[in-house]
Structures are given as structure tokens and as C-alpha cells.
Image: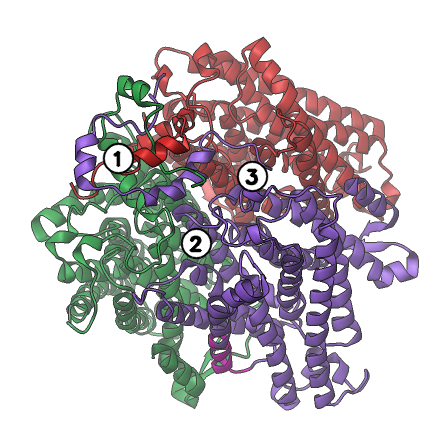
Chain colours: A red, B green, C purple
Amino acid sequence: MVKVLFLILFALFGQYSNNAMPGGTTIFQDVHLMTLVGMGFIMVFLRRYGLAALSINLLLTSHAIQWALIVRGFFSHEFANIGRFAISILDLITADFVAITVLITMGAVLGKLTPVQYMVMSAIEVPIAVAVEHVILRYLKVIDIGRSMVIHCFGAYFGLAVAKVINKKEMIAHQHEGSSYNSNIFALIGTLFLWAFFPSFNSALAIPEDSRHRAILNTYLALCSSTICTFLISQLLDHEHKYRFSMIHISNSVLAGGIAIGTVANIILEPFYALLIGCLGALVSVLGNHYIRPIGVRVFGLHDTRGVGSIHGLPGILAGILGFIFTAVYEPTRYGTGNVTHIYPAMNSNDEGREIFVQAGYQLAALAIVLVVSITGGAVTGLILRLNCFNRIHEKEFYSDGEFIEPPEDYDFTTRIISKIDHIELTEHTALNKESSTSVVGPSNP
Amino acid sequence: MVKVLFLILFALFGQYSNNAMPGGTTIFQDVHLMTLVGMGFIMVFLRRYGLAALSINLLLTSHAIQWALIVRGFFSHEFANIGRFAISILDLITADFVAITVLITMGAVLGKLTPVQYMVMSAIEVPIAVAVEHVILRYLKVIDIGRSMVIHCFGAYFGLAVAKVINKKEMIAHQHEGSSYNSNIFALIGTLFLWAFFPSFNSALAIPEDSRHRAILNTYLALCSSTICTFLISQLLDHEHKYRFSMIHISNSVLAGGIAIGTVANIILEPFYALLIGCLGALVSVLGNHYIRPIGVRVFGLHDTRGVGSIHGLPGILAGILGFIFTAVYEPTRYGTGNVTHIYPAMNSNDEGREIFVQAGYQLAALAIVLVVSITGGAVTGLILRLNCFNRIHEKEFYSDGEFIEPPEDYDFTTRIISKIDHIELTEHTALNKESSTSVVGPSNP
Amino acid sequence: MVKVLFLILFALFGQYSNNAMPGGTTIFQDVHLMTLVGMGFIMVFLRRYGLAALSINLLLTSHAIQWALIVRGFFSHEFANIGRFAISILDLITADFVAITVLITMGAVLGKLTPVQYMVMSAIEVPIAVAVEHVILRYLKVIDIGRSMVIHCFGAYFGLAVAKVINKKEMIAHQHEGSSYNSNIFALIGTLFLWAFFPSFNSALAIPEDSRHRAILNTYLALCSSTICTFLISQLLDHEHKYRFSMIHISNSVLAGGIAIGTVANIILEPFYALLIGCLGALVSVLGNHYIRPIGVRVFGLHDTRGVGSIHGLPGILAGILGFIFTAVYEPTRYGTGNVTHIYPAMNSNDEGREIFVQAGYQLAALAIVLVVSITGGAVTGLILRLNCFNRIHEKEFYSDGEFIEPPEDYDFTTRIISKIDHIELTEHTALNKESSTSVVGPSNP
């Protein structure tokens, strides 16, 4: 049905752009790998939900990309002028960006919705996200080069609001919610791809070349910094004071530097600030995950499966605040002549000729808009998802893909049972005695 | 031995091209990742054959690339003129294409041959594939920009023919043929890489820039569309009517859109057609896999381990037919002046000055040639592989890598035994009683 | 602490380069994926150390990159002139190179050090590696385009020396040192990424275009060749004469061709030599691993967890010797006019105007310097790591990440216990009898 609608919309309004974008292909592939492989595998940390996480990630990506192309097309100049919109490779990049927003939201409700519910969520979220982006970047002419506010922050708090509204007490402390050794390794595939391509992500839309160059370098250094800080802080927070690392911190918070620097990645001129912002990003991400997230569950019944509130949300807010600060202390002369028009187009005298403090105010207003709209939108979406017309997941099957995926032969063994094995007391004595008479499994050739 | 032959052939005839290809490196890396990571991991779905699938994939890739460079070299102008052939980065891309053809063929006989037999198969298939490509694209001047006919269709039906000829009844319903939870996740690594780089694959050889641009956009939209359709159709086909997704569909048929649009990826001007073709691709791929493949096994004894007949073959045939249709309705004026020479060189008045319907006929003839040659070639190859001079896999060890790979310590456990565990009835009662006296394993520190 | 030092150093001395490097982004991303994904996953072969290997790989990469940027900055012209150093994308590539050196070293002591000890090791190794590279490439004007001597050879023998000094008898034949089926598949992810991007790695710093072009083609062919040879030789060395492949050879030695050709990748003009060098690389790598490595353990107490001495070290020495040979037989006229300045700058008459045999001598001297400095530096580093001020790993926990990583629920099961399961005799008889009364695990819903 949705598919048919897409077909009709594209048939009526879609056309390809005549402008090729020679240099854009590489960045497009980088961003696309982040969406599919990075965002996909980072959600495989649940031991019973790996196949579903990857499958639904792929489904939502395909859905959100098409829907974003259409919605963005309706907002475009071409559509206003000639009644059709054009699609270029640049549009594929921004469509991937919208898909990433939806995938961040998905993290908060991972394992709680059916595929149809995820599709409905995506169908509602995409136009809101595109509209917010359009208002903030086009009308308010706010700077957010790596889209930390409109992607990370928006996606995270939209997801938190959905999660709050659809919450049931059975979702909390559920037996299936946990990782396994291999699921943690799979999650690291996601982490490493996001890490490696984050410089491409933050610089994808930066022009001209020197702006892009700065965005790459700043993101890279911020990531290095947040990685080291994450390890350091994670060690200090070990529950048993053994100075061990927590995999949830390592696979997620190492990326906080890239998010925190996103808004100002092309503005910062000093490596020092990039490193400092990386540290701050890791700090809010790890501490948020360790202290604020459990409070959310306990006090507000706000369960966030992947912890996106801390992992994407807090560094996203930090990015917004940094956008305000760096705008407030902006010195155009340091960027060489002419660059002011590229970095803050609204400050150009041909445009509005905004003062610095006005632009800084707009930056802060943008952050407020993102927070208000994402939380409101998420709450409304959550209410819609609670309507009786949708199938829901059986309570025993939260965080488990058995209801959506035809299970492989070893499903129960490798996903459910395995996690119970550590409750069995294995004494050396028993083991030795029983060795020959115990059968773990059936015969290999029955 | 083969190695020494390669050395001699390269020594006698090989030289490097003087023409660098500045822009080609990125596409080359994309295609190369598809070959190694994409085609490799998509074959890890068998729970006992993962290491073999990846290892033999790497071996066959290395072998097919070298052999393809040599064979293609012998077909080249340089060789005809000066007795030596040149190798450029463009040749590496086309060599990777030939390797992908061989790897598709490998899918049909996955788990049924020894490494030596795979090498022999590759040694025979490479020259046939190169010759067919040469005849179709150079002599007949047929259009197949993403090589859906000469790679996907050829590779699949070559493999089916080999599989038919070498078939033994023990290959069907074998106990080792099955997936595990982790092997399905590994297979999705392959799927995601193939998905992400398919636009590069289909556009790798498209020139000029606007043609390449269209190939990227069309492939991307076709993939989005086939992904959504695959999920939809897979749900409807669930054997137990629980509307669950089947991993074999998800990890394979989502790519059908990219294959189906391959032949015409640079010709289509409307997003609508790309989406429609994606749907059709998913339809033939999923339905073929669900209905036709079991008939093949039951009626013809035609066992196709990875299902390449449906996954690559049918969308490849569809691509060939679409090539015919889009050629028949071709309107040169819509592409701007001059483009006609790029899209259908044979219709250029400096060349043959072919009429549209003649070109369309050639397109259909090319599809027929691919089918006839691939099936004949595969059958002959199968007969050769049945010669007594080759070692064969022991019947109990089909779909298992224990005969080729020195096993890791936990081999039996994680591959063979695990799949039997679900036959054991585990009652809560028994479990509680036995908890302290049961030993799963030996002591951890003997 | 280290972090604060980095902040201060960058604050005082770091600034961004004004020169963008338009074409460099792609290569930078390729090299970066090799560092994070390739070097990371190739170390996941130990079944109990996967999470630690990936985590510490990420930590060391972030640390080594920053430290390398600072140290290289201090060696730069800008720093000498204006007291600050500039950072461009080219510097990120070379910083990644230094990180790879450290990660190779890490392979030799994998599972033997605490994270703090690894950081200290990296802190000492980075300046030595940068200094050696600076002396060899800048002062001695030696050719090493793919950095086989200064990265692979240096990293390996530095690691061997550290391993020798910190060796304890408990490190040898430890019960935790072994792979599992899945850990071998994860390691192949690393292998495939390193394979796919090795041409980018060896050509990253090659200019002009034709030199880069040759480096790509030669590396690619050498890899194909070493892959086939590795499979061939591995089969012949099977301990039980069953002609099976060993995963340690396949996941490591297939890359030997890329290392062996590194020094001369842009010099070789004939495909034949590339293939031959690939064979030789595989030969020294596999034979070294099979024969020399056990002698090292038995005779010298020299335990090398990943076998980097054979996998990176011997092909690195081979590369150095090939650098000598190809320099000695160098014929400038074959490269066209003007190229001599690019390939051997010191032979340019505007420069030193070196004779061929002098340059060849310098090449050999460089290899000697690498070996002497790496072994000495590693030994000193090992002594420092044995100081009492550092925590050490408990002897029972070598090759295990339980002391650093908060374990997932199934930790004991999937890592420690699994490797014992094959000692249990499972008879068909027993299994059938016990099927209903045996419990592998606790109840699924207690």
C-alpha cells in the first residue's frame, strides 16, 4: 500500500536532476555505509534481536529514504516552480541523513514495536524531521553542518518521547534484554564503521573546500579525544570497582565526540578545541548513560533500549550549545576574506546582514525548536502507535525477534538458553564424574 | 602449477598500461569490497561452511582475477597489434566483474565441491564468460551497463547446470545444510555491503557523467523498492501464516532490484520506472525462491545451495527483457543531443546506424546467447568435474568445511552439535532438579 | 593525564593546515578503515579476547594518532620555523600509518598486557617509529613507498623484542590461547578489509599519478599471487597430511604479497615480478609461521601471540631486500624522462646526484637501521613494562578479557567453557538414553 503510494508520488512528481555532482559519489557511499552497516550493526547488541535489528534497519532505511526524497521534494524550489522535483546524488545524501534520524529514534524503542509499527513511526517522523530541518537551516539560516541538532538530537528525543508513551512495565528489566559475547562484537562492527566515516558525515555538506577540510580534521580529532575519555571514564564507573570497561560505553560513547562537534565542525580553527569538545562529548555521554538513564527508568518509567537519550541526545544538545558559544565569539577576520558568507550566510550584507549576537540567538532558538518539536512529535507518534488497529508484540517477546523472523534451527539455543547457562553451578568434581555419562545434545546422526 | 602457468603468461604477455585512470580508484575499491566482503559473507549462511565459504571465496577471487586479466588480455587490441596486453585499473574492475560471475556460480554448488574442483570450475568458466561478454558487448554492441545479463544471469545458470550434472541424492535434504543465528548475521554483512555498493557496481563502467549519474540514482531507488517489496512478499509467504520474514529472502532478494535494473540503469529517465523495476525484481526473486526452487529439487533433482537461480538468474532474465523493452521504446531526443552515441553506439550513423527495432532484437538475442552458452558451458563443466581424477567430498561432509579447514577447538560444538540441541526436551522441572548435578562441560581448570 | 598533556601540546603548538588536499579524502578513509576495521578484526581470532582486542585496538589507535600528530609536528619544517605545526589530511594518513605500526606490535603481545601497559608501550614506540621513519625517508632519502620496512618490519620486531622481555613461562601453551569457529570468521573480516584496501595503502603516498597507478596494480597482483600460494603451501603443511588449510595461514599470510611488494610497489614495471614477489611473500610468511615460530617459542622462549614476526616481519625484511635489488638494477630510461627525480629524489643532479650503487647501499642500510632500532627499542620498552609500578595481568587470565571488560551474561559459556566441550565423549547410545533427563541449562522462565 505504502509502496503503491510511493510509486504514484514518484510517477507524478519525481524526475532526475540534470546536474551531476562529480565529487559527491564517494561521500554518498561513505554516508550510505554508515546508514546500512554502521547504524545496523550498532543495534545488534541485544542477543535475541540481532536479525530483527538488521532487517528492520534495512527496511526502515529503504522506507525513510524514499519518503524523505518525496517530502523534501515537496519543499523544494523546483516543486514550487514547475510542479515536479528533481533528484540528484546530493538528495540521496540528505535522504540518508533523514534515514539516520529515524534509525536513532528506532534505538529508543528497539525490541518494542512490530515492523508495521516501525513503518508507521517512520512515516510520521520523516515529514516532521524534514520540516524542522527546512525551518532551521533554510528559514532561520542556522548553522548545523554535521546536523547534530537536526539529526542526533531530534532523533533521540523523538525516540524517548515515543518510548515514554508506549511504555509498559513489562518492558523494564525484561529477561531477554541483554547482550552476548558475539552480539557485542557485532555491535562493534557498527561502532567502527560509524567512527571511520564520521568525518565524511560531518563534512558531507560543507562547502567550500577549506570548510570541508576543517570539518574532517575537527571531527577526526574530536573522535580520538572522545574515545580515550570514554575508556577513562568507563573504567572509573565500574560497578565492582575493578576498573573494567563497559561495552555499552565503548561501543557507543566513543562516537560522542563526532556528535558534539557536529554543529561547529567547520567553524573551529584550533585542534585544541576539537580535543576539548571530544572530551566533553564523552563526558556527557558516559555520565548520562550511567546516572541519568537509570533515573529515567526508575522515576519516569522512561525505558530507552539503546540509550539514545544519552548517546545521541546529550551530545546533540552539547553541540547546539557549542553552536551558540562559537557563534557568539565568532571573529570573521580569522577565516580570511569572503568566508563569512559561507559560514553564516545570514550575516552577509547581501542577505539579512545579521549581527553576531542575533545569529547566536537564532542558534539557541534552533536547539529549543528541535527539543520542543521532537518531544511533542514523538509523544503524538507514540499515542498513534498505541491505537488498537496495530498488532503489538506479545509481552514475553519484547527484545526478541522470534515473532517476526522465521527462526534458524539453533534459535532457542543460541539466543534464549545461552543466557541462562551461567546460573548453573559447575563444580570440578561433578564435571569429572559425569563426563562420560552426560549428553549435552542429541546424537549427531540420529 | 596453475600459479606457474600464470607467471609464465604474465611474463610473456603482460605489461602495465601507461594510461592512469585518476577517477577510477574509488569505484575500483567499491567493486573490490563487493567481491571480497559482499560476495564472501553472503555465502556464510551455512552454519558448518562459514570458514570454507570465505576462504574459497578469497581463493577463487584471486584465481579468477588473474585468469580474467590474461584471457581478456588475449582478446584485446593491444595483444592483436603488439603481442602483449596492457593492464590498467579499468581492467582490474572488469576482472573483478568476472570474479563475481564465478562467485555467483559457486553459490549454486556451495558445499558440494573440493577446493581443487572449484579452481577447475573457475578455470573453465572464466574464458567462456569473457568470450560471451566480448561477443555480446563488442561484436553485437548490446547494452548491459550493470552486466545483469553477462554476470548475474550467466553466473547463475552456469552454476545451475553444474549443480544438475554433479548432483547426488545425498546432497538433498542433508543434515548439515542449515543456518544458525550467527551465520545469518554474518550473511547480512554480505548483503549490506552488496546493497551499499550496488550503485557503484551498476555505474562503474557508465560514461559520460550524466549516464553514470542516472545509473547510480536508478539503482539506488530500485534497491529501496525491492527491499520494501521483499519484506512485504516474504511476510505473506510464511509457511505457518504468522507473517514472519524469512532470512533467505531478506538476505538475498533485497538485492534483486539492483540486478533487475542493471541492464538499463543508465537509460531510465524516470524515478517511477526504477521503483517499479525494483518491485518486479523482488517479486520474481522471492516467488522464484519460494515456488520454483523446490520444484527444481523435487522434479529435476536440481539442488541450488544458495538459490542463485532465483536470486541472480530470474532478476537477470528480467533485466534482459527490460533491456529489450526500453530499447524498443527508446526516444533519442529525450537524452539531449549527442547522447545517442553513448547509450547505443551501434545506432550512431558513423557506426552501423542501426534502427531501434534492430537494436532491440540484438538485446533479446544477447539474452538468448547468455542462457544457451551458460547452460551448455555449465553442463560440460559439470561433466569434467565428475571425472575420476578429482577427489570428491565424502558424502557425509557435504556443506561442511571439516575436510578442508583445520578445525578450531570448538568446531563440533558450534557447528554440528548446536543444531541438534533444539530436539532435546527441556522441562522446567528436570532443569531445576538437575541443576547442581549436571555438567555441561568438563572442568574449566582440569 | 596523558589526555591533558595532549590537550596542552595541541593548544600550544597545533594548528590546521591551510592547504586542503582535494584528492586525499578517499585514500584517507581507505587507510582509516584498514586501521580500525582491518587491524581490529584480524586480532579477534582469540576466542576469549575478542572484545578486548577490538576495544584496545580502538583505544591505541586514538592514542597513537594524536601522539603521532604531535611528534611528527615537532619534526616538521613549520615547527622549526614558526614554533607551531600544521595538520592536514595528509598528516592524518601518516598518523594512521604510525597507529598501524603500534597495532602490529600489539599483535606480538596480544593478551599479555593491561590497557595501561599498552598505552605506555604506544607512548614509547610512537616517537621511536616517527624518528626512524624521519631519518630513513628524509635524511637517507631511502625509498619505501608502502612503508614495508618502517611499518611492518619495524612494528613486528619491536613487538617481538617486547614479547621476549616480558615473557613468562605461563604465557606459553596457555589454556585460553585458542580460537573458536566464530572468532575465526571475525578475524576474516579483518583480513578481507586489509586485502581490499592494501592497494590504497601501498599507493597512498605515491605521486605522481603514474607512480600511484603502478603501486595499485602491483600490490593487487602481488596479493592475488600470495593468496593462491598461501592456500597451496598451507595445504602441504597440514600436520595430519589431510591437505587441509590452516586458518592462521589463510587469515594472515594471504596479505604477505602486499607487504613484500610494499617497498618497491611503485618501481616495478612488469606484472610478472609482482606475481613472483607475491609468491615469495607467501612462502616466507607461511614457512616462517610454521617452522621458525615454534622454534622461537621452544628455543628462545619467544612467544608471539599473533605471529607478527612471520606475518609482518619476514615479508617486511623481504621487502627491504627487494628494495636493494630493484635499486641495484634500476634503469632510469625505462620510466620516461623526468621520473627519476620522483622515484629516487637523491639521484637527481639538483640534489645529491647519487650513483645507483650508493642508493642501493642506502636501501640496505635502512633495513639494518630498522632492525637494530626496533629490536633495541622493543627490548627497552619491555624492561619499562616490567617495572613494578604497573599492574599486570593475573597469570590465569592471559589471553582473556575478563579482567578489563564487564562481561556479558554468557561470557563463561561462550568463551571459556565452549573450548572444553570437545573433550566430552558423546556416544550416540548415551545421548539417546539421557535425552529427556538431561538439562543443559536452567529453565527458560525461572
**Rendered residue at 20%/40% (across/down):** A443
| C124 on left or right of A43 | right
Evaluate whether residue A140 shows in this view.
no
| Residue C339 sits above or below residue B410 on the image | below
- Same subunit: marks 3 and 2: no
User: Is B345 or C357 nearer to us in this picture?
Assistant: C357
Q: Nearer the viewer, mark 1 or mark 3?
A: 1
| Residue A156 sits above or below residue A188 on the image | above
| Residue A26 sits above or below residue A122 on the image | below
Name the kind of residue labelled 1 in the image.
Ser
Chain letter of mark 1 equals: A
Q: Secondary structure at mark 2?
A: helix
Sequence-wise, the earlier of marks 1 and 3 is 3
Q: Which residue is mark 2?
A: B37
Residue A439, label in figure: 1
- Same subunit: marks 2 and 1: no
Name the kind of residue labelled 3 in the image.
Thr
State the quadrant of the N terminus of chain C: top right
The segment highlighted magenta reads: C269-279
**Rendered residue at 38%/54% (across/down):** B40
Q: Nearer the viewer, mark 3 or mark 2?
A: 2
Q: Secondary structure at mark 1?
A: loop
| A225 on left or right of B181 | right
**Rendered residue at 18%/74% (across/down):** B389
Residue A94, label in figure: 3
Marks 1 and 3, how far apart in space?
56 Å
Residue C209, x across and y down, in percent: 62, 72
Q: Residues within 10 Å of mark 2 (few under 14, many from 20)?
A: many
